[in-house]
Image (tube, grey):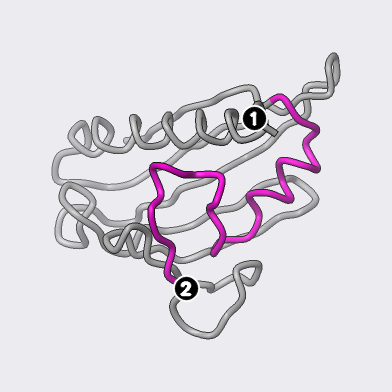
Amino acid sequence: MSCYNSVIVPAAIDDVWNEIRNFHRLDWGRPFITSVKAVGGLPGDCVGAKRVLNGAFEETLLDLDDANYSMQYSIDDGPEPVSQSSVSNYLGQIQLLPVTSDNTTFAQWMSEYTADDPQLVADFCNPIYAALLEALRDHFTAA
């Protein structure tokens, strides 16, 4: 099963990437992201960096690809329905693509996973990703 959400961000791709590439910094995700706690000693731009979002979602950075404006992460544990006991192999990806006609950015957030109830996970995660993408867009709209 999978989730998919996308948005057009009114900023150049390099500006958007510079805002989101640090796994430990989600200022742009307010008010939906209320806290980000770095776990362990790795910086937010190193594969293997770990974080806890909103005191509930434990995640690990699996890939950071500056050339392709892409990052992949796992959800290692979280609240139901994305808890370790209900979901396995949760792989999330944020990918940016340039919109060359007007120098904006197409941002897409995708995930794949195995779950006891895949639709329940999709119903839980899709609104979160949609809200975060809207917050990213709004972050640049307000700038």
Mark 2 surroundings within 10 Å by alpha-carbon count, few (fewer than 14), some (14 through 19), many (20 or more): some
Residue occupied by mark 2: 38
Residue 127 occupies which quadrant of the picture?
A: top left
Asked if 111 appears above or below 107 in the picture, the reply is below
Query: Where residue 82 sits in the image (x, y, percent)?
Result: 23, 51
Amino acid type at circle 1 is: Ala
Residue at 57% x, 24% y: name it: 7
In screen coordinates, is 141 left or right of 66?
A: left
Q: Which residues are magenta?
A: 10-37
- The numbered mark, 2 or 1, whose residue comes first in the sequence reads 2
Residue occupied by mark 1: 142
Judged from the image, the secondary structure of the residue bearing numbered disc 1 is helix
Give the label on residue 62, or none: none
Asked if 40 appears above or below 4 in the picture, the reply is below
Task: Give the position of the N terminus as an image quadrant.
Answer: top left
Query: Where residue 139 sits in the image (x, y, percent)?
Result: 61, 35
